[in-house]
Every structure is written in C-alpha cells, then in structure tokens.
Image (spheres, grey):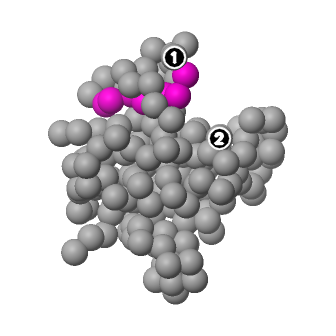
Amino acid sequence: MLKLNLGSGFRNIPGYINIDNRESTTSDLVHDITTGLPYGDNSVDEVRAYDILEHIPIGKTMALIEDIYRVLKPGGRFEHFTPSTDGRGAFQDHDHKSFWNINSWLYFMDDAHRALYGTKAKFQGNNTDVVTNPELKIIHTHGILFAVKS
C-alpha cells in the first residue's frame, strides 16, 4: 500500500512516504510538491495533507489538488486538515499563501462547481469544520475524501 504524507516536516508517520521540501526535516523524500508528485497515474492508495495546503501559493493550489487526484487510485483516500478562513488560524501565520474553507472543496466535489473551471479532480466524502482552539478562535476544515474515477 502506497501512502504519502505531504508537508511532513518533523512529523513523520510510519507506513507513509513522508515528503517535505526542506532538507532540514526528517522526511523520507525532499521534494517540492508544487512541481508535481513524482508518482505514476493511479499508483497511490492514500494522500495525507495536514497543515500544508495553506502554504501553497494561490496560483498553484488547483494544480496540486489535480495532481493528488491524478496519482490516487480509483477510490483512493485523500485526507486534509487545513486552517479555515472561518476562524483566525488561516490568517495568523505570515507564511500562509492560500486560504481555504469548507466551500473551497465544492470545486473538487460538486459537478456544477467543477464545470466552472473545468476541474478534472472529482472527490466524494465529507468535509467538516473543527474548532481546534476555542480560546484563539482557530477552526480547521477536515476532509476525508475519495477519488471518483471511472
């Protein structure tokens, strides 16, 4: 089973290929995911993206999600955990380069929204908002999605 942990930093997960773009981390693979994932079509069982999507520049987010979809096997699992613009967490980190909320995922799940931009990626599953720090008013969007392919 091939599983990828994108933006692993120093949080390697056993059983995953831990990928980060910084050589200073303890990742298994140093790679800039904005240039594409170095795996073949339909070759990956699972992709995990915790606290990484918000660090991808706005102009490159669509291509990254499309590439995650490309490498996932039909029914492959994509799990994300991203600070939501519905809370303060999305804006507090000076290195955040894109902004997400639960509605952002409509463009990868709902056919009418996908048609607006010609999005190839199609996922089904659930996205929920999770209050991760009530005192600081931080909300994350957590999704467990599955690649819909014929």
Q: What segment carries the magenta color? A: 16-22
The residue that disc 2 covers is 55
**Label 1: element kind:** loop
Which residue: 55% across, 13% down? 24
Residue 87 placement, left or right of 54: right
**Residue furthest to the front:** 35
Q: Are marks 1 and 2 in contact (CB under 8 Å)?
A: no
**Pick the front one: 31 or 73:** 31
* Spot occupied by residue 54 in the image (x, y as percentages of width and height): 65, 45
* Spot occupied by residue 12 in the image (x, y as percentages of width and height): 41, 22
**Residue 144's mark?**
none
Residue 105 included in the magenta stretch of the image: no
Q: Name above or below for residue 132 compared with residue 123.
A: above
* Spot occupied by residue 86 in the image (x, y as percentages of width and height): 75, 57
**Label 2: element kind:** helix
Task: For marks 1 and 2, give the CA distance.
Answer: 17 Å
